Amino acid sequence: MKAMPQTTLTDAEARDLRALVGLMIPASTTYKVPGADDDLIFADILKSLERDTDDARTALAQLATMSGGAFADLPADRRAEVAATFKTEGGAPLFALNRVVLLCYYRDDRVMRSLGQEPRSPFPKGHVVEQGDWSLLEPVKKRAPIYRKVP
């Protein structure tokens, strides 16, 4: 029988993840926004990993290997070096982790307010979308179909 995947990170993995996301999106006093390692945002990241937990775990294992141990325990300058290398070598697991981090970060009300956005869901009010130049679609409309018709 196949073992069920673990759905939460270990404490050590969570510590490394928190240190990593703090480098990915640091706090900014200029824009008055928290970093991705903020308590509320990080809790949302951990809760939102769900189907990406295995990728997160793989990415964090790669990070630990590159760090020669716990990433969170490295001095700040070494942590930045390892993170820069990880950015180029992390592959698909890091891509999945990036997606979760960005989704959670831009879900935070403080971040949305700093961008001049009302922190609310898009419906039922909707959002005004600026109209573009529809004539740009003409070449696409004129081209032959690129699909196969079904009988």
Image: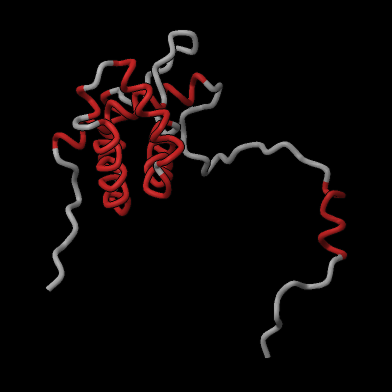
Seen as rendered, the residue at the extreme bottom is 151
Residue 94 lies, in percent from the top left, at 39, 43
Height in image: 47 above or below 31?
A: below
In front of the other: 57 or 114:
57
Task: Using the rendered view, name the quadrant where residue 115 is placed.
Answer: top right
* Image quarter in which the N terminus is found: bottom left
Task: Using the rendered view, name the quadrant where residue 25 is placed.
Answer: top left
Residue 3 lies, in percent from the top left, at 14, 65
In front of the other: 72 or 11:
72
Task: Using the rendered view, name the quadrant where residue 138 is placed.
Answer: bottom right
Left or right, residue 138 beside residue 55:
right
Height in image: 67 above or below 116?
A: below
Seen as rendered, the residue at the extreme top is 30
Left or right, residue 129 beside residue 52:
right
Left or right, residue 99 beside residue 72:
right
* Image quarter in which the C terminus is found: bottom right
Q: Residue at x 20, y 51 (%)?
A: 7
In front of the other: 106 or 13:
13
Residue 44 lies, in percent from the top left, at 30, 36
Q: Residue at x 27, y 52 (%)?
A: 54
Left or right, residue 80 beside residue 16:
right
How is colour applied across the structure in the image?
secondary structure
Residue 136 lies, in percent from the top left, at 84, 49
Q: How many marks?
A: 0
Q: Residue at x 41, y 32 (%)?
A: 85
